[in-house]
Amino acid sequence: MPKQKYYAVWAGRTPGIFENWEECKKSVEGFVWAQYKSFASHEECKVALRRSSSDYIGNTQKSTEPTPSDIKKYGTPIQKSISVDGAWNTVTGWCEYQWVMTDTEEKIFSGWPYADGTNNIVEFLGIIHALRYCQENNLDLPIYTDSQTAISWVKAKNARTKQPRTQANIELFLLVDQAVLWLKKNEIKNPILKWETKIWGEIKADFGRK
């Protein structure tokens, strides 16, 4: 039997990860400037989608293994910290987030799924929730996320999502609006750091749904 392929779609009708060509085809066929590539595993797709499509498309081989210079540059993560992660179902649109203590992997918060969202939205909400927790408990812990987009939203104090507001995601966007309002009223004192998956493996708050 042929080996299963997984497809990472950066630009298409529905960006995300697809487990077969037929589903991927629905997203990219006839879509102007579609950007997608097949990989041998779901994990490789997840790593690829965190990077630019230009790092993969047009290259016959792109190593995801850390180089010695990568290891030297990024070192090791700060253990006394909080790790945040979001999960998004590319088929149903349901999303959720959770966060843990990095050193012990003790789960501090795990929310229920929200309808009609995106991974970036829940990554953003996870960071804000962790910031509020640190403020309320007088903690100066760094906060890790593997979403560069979510970090940029926090810095801009605005959730720059293109996800349309619908009847289904009213609850989710209420949280987004509250998060933005909190950002604008409060000073961010905790470092918000990028988790380097390529070097360190999956972030400690990862949902493990591979």
Image (cartoon, helix red, strand yellow):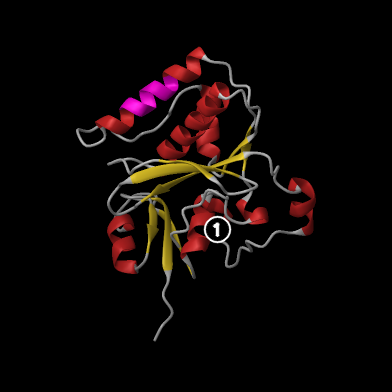
Q: Is residue 189 left or right of residue 92?
A: right
In this view, the residue in front, 193 or 37, is 193
| Quadrant assignment, res 55 | bottom right
Q: Could you tell me residue 36's position as x and y percent?
A: 43, 58
Q: Could you tell me residue 131's position as x and y percent?
A: 54, 27
> Is 184 located above or below residue 115 in the figure?
above
In this view, the residue in front, 56 or 134, is 134
**Prevailing secondary structure class for the magenta stretch in the rendered image:** helix
Asked whether 96 falls inside the magenta stretch, the response is no
Label 1, on which residue? 56
Stretch in magenta? 174-180
- Crowding near the residue tagged with mark 1, few <14, some 14–19, many ≥20 C-alpha atoms within 10 Å: some
Residue type at mark 1 is Tyr
Q: Could you tell me residue 129's position as x and y percent?
A: 47, 30
Extreme residue in the left direction: 167
Q: Could you tell me residue 152's position as x and y percent?
A: 54, 31
Which element is circle 1 on?
A: loop
Q: How many marks?
A: 1
Q: Is residue 13 left or right of residue 103?
A: left
Quarter of the picture containing the C terminus is bottom left
Q: Which residue does the image show at 50% across and 35% down from the upper left? A: 150
In this view, the residue in front, 21 or 156, is 156
Asked whether 179 falls inside the magenta stretch, the response is yes
Extreme residue in the bottom direction: 1
Q: Which residue does the image show at 61% across and 52% down from the upper left? A: 197
